[in-house]
Amino acid sequence: MENNKSSMTALISAFARAYHTENDLPKIFNDTLARDFLTDEEYTLISNNMLAGLAYFKPENNLTFANDAEALKWVVQTRLAPITLARASYCEEMLQNAVMLGVNQYVILGAGMDTFAFRHPELLKKLHVFELDHPATQAFKRSRIQSLGWEISENFHQVPIDFTTDNLVDTLTKAGFNPDERAYFSWLGVTYYLSQDKIMDVLKSVAKIARKGSTLMFDYPDEKLFKSEVSRVKSMLAMAAASGEPMKSCFSYAELESLLEQAGFLIYEHLSPTDIEASYFQHRQDYLHAFEHVHFALAVVH
């Protein structure tokens, strides 16, 4: 695991979901299985790393904490969890809508430690779930699922792919994806780290293999990201750069709309940070609030 950056990144995301499920009310996204993907040692290690980086995260207004538990709560709720929780909740709400409209294929681009297929076994009786991710992350997840003894539906498909070298259309086709049936695609937490050309490649590939009327839900940063004076935005950018995976792309709404249209999509719904705050964080009494400059988009293949 020490050398498997992709798996560790996926585990940190699972940690944020697990922490929220175990500690926060009301729930934004209730991932009852995320904690199972983490050993006690991994959970403790991530917690300790978050606490060790407290000074780096720079609490606003010289904020101090009574104990480590309160400090960890601040780090998770202000830095790790807001984007992860809100986009997962919105993504699965839109997926449920798609399923009600007859969609029977769900493709998760960059699945990480996603638990949807195991939280909704009844849906997998009629829904094929294709989880695409790096082979190393897929192998780690597969071993963890086996060690947990979870039942694997025949409609659950783990699809190893190196997005930098492999052809998405060919990979999905070989995995049994049916281009004649509408599908729902999710692409969460990825666009930040890709060049615009690479984003366009993925969008065109999805539009090429997906039947008209299929949908893609993704999150993206707006054009103010790199000039932001918000402390947690600045620390997010610095952390990404320090980890060797700097953020590369951001878009105005007009730029995104043009990019999607060129690739074969139309925007069906768009949530700004203000919209996300109103939908998922309103009236909370803790640190959880929508992340500045991060938007959600639901696009339709036309």
Image (cartoon, grey):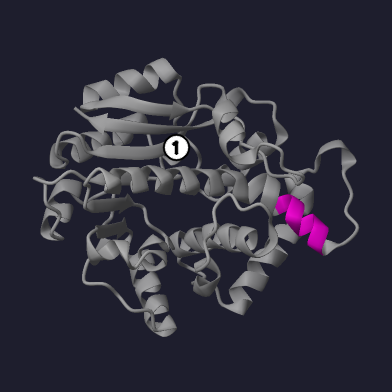
Q: Nearer the viewer, residue 277 or 140?
A: 277
Residue at image point 69% right, 30% down: 230
Q: Amino acid at mark 1?
A: Asp
Left or right of 194? Residue 227 is right
Pinpoint residue 287: horizontal percent, then vertical percent. 74, 45
Identify the residue shown where x is 30% and y is 59%.
131
Quadrant placement of the C terminus:
top left
Q: Quadrant of residue 197?
A: top left
> Which span of residues is magenta-colored?
69-75
Residue at image x 22%, y 52%?
105
The answer to whether 76 appears left or right of 296 in the picture is right
Q: Is residue 102 above or below residue 148?
A: above
Tell whether position 238 is magenta: no
Total marks in image: 1
**Does the image show residue 69?**
yes
Among all residues in the image, which is located at the extreme front?
Answer: 100
Q: Which residue is mark 1?
A: 219
Q: Nearer the viewer, residue 52 or 75?
A: 75
Looking at the picture, does residue 41 appear above or below residue 26? below
- Dot 1 lies on which element? strand
Classify 201 as above or below 20: above
Q: Position of residue 218 (x, y in %)?
A: 39, 39
Does the segment drawn in magenta span residue 73?
A: yes
What secondary structure do most residues of the magenta stretch adopt?
Answer: helix
Q: Is residue 63 above or below residue 69?
A: above
